[in-house]
Image: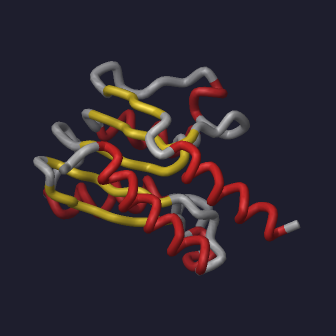
């Protein structure tokens, strides 16, 4: 029941909330021991803050909940490949796993030749079509 697809569906629902609030539709959650520690979506427009990406919000919330700066034994589920800023934060958090919906060929950390912490497992392509379509629809609505 608690599969990567299960949690990515929750992240996708968060991304849809962002979509309807006119935020770039990216959703993220952090899970440990099948318990959701933090959920978020992009809040850059609402907070007028370029650093208010879904991943950054989730990292901060999970760290606050755990009372720890390291997210060892935690998994981040995010609908879009993290940017360089978010990848840097994930690196320093030492998160154990990152599970991504769809890649970001232009602004994702992989396109910049960067990597996560050596102990971080990286999985991509979970509900890729659904995550990609939501982003495509959002940006088409802006044209």
Quadrant position of the C terminus in the picture: bottom right
The answer to whether residue 16 is above or below residue 88 is below
Instruction: Locate residue 93, reporting x and y percent.
Output: 30, 40
Identify the residue at horizontal 62%, vertical 62% (top origin): 50
Q: Is residue 17 left or right of residue 116?
A: right
Front residue of 27/112: it is 27
Which image quadrant for residue 26? bottom right
Q: Position of residue 131 (x, y in %)?
A: 56, 52
Residue at the image point whose x is 34% and y is 19% from the top? 118
Which residue is drawn at the image coordinates 69% and 34% (left, top)? 105
Name which residue lies at 42% across and 43% down. Answer: 89
**Furthest residue toward left:** 33
The colour scheme applied to this rendered structure is: secondary structure
- Position of residue 68 relative to residue 138, above or below, is above
Expressed as whole percent of the image width and height from the top left, the position of residue 82 reads 52, 42
> Is 69 on the left-hand or right-hand side of 129?
left
The front one of 109 and 102 is: 102
Image spot of residue 94 (x, y percent): 28, 34
Where, by quadrant of the figure, is residue 67 drawn? bottom left
Answer with left or right where residue 34 lies relative to residue 87: left
Name, please, the residue furthest toward the right: 143
Q: Nearer the viewer, residue 57 or 16?
A: 16
| Label tally | 0
């Amino acid at each position: 029941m608690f599969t990567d697809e299960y949690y990515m569906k929750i992240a996708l629902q968060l991304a849809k909330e962002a979509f309807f609030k006119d935020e770039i539709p990216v959703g993220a959650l952090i899970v440990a021991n099948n318990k959701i520690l933090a959920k978020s979506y992009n809040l850059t427009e609402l907070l007028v803050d370029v650093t208010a990406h879904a991943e950054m919000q989730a990292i901060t919330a999970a760290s606050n909940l755990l009372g720890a700066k390291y997210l060892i034994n935690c998994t981040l589920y995010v609908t879009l490949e993290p940017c360089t800023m978010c990848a840097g934060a994930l690196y320093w958090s030492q998160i154990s796993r990152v599970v991504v919906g769809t890649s970001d060929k232009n602004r994702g950390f992989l396109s910049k030749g960067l990597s996560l912490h050596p102990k971080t497992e990286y999985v991509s392509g979970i509900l890729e079509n659904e995550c990609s379509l939501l982003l495509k629809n959002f940006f088409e609505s802006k044209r």
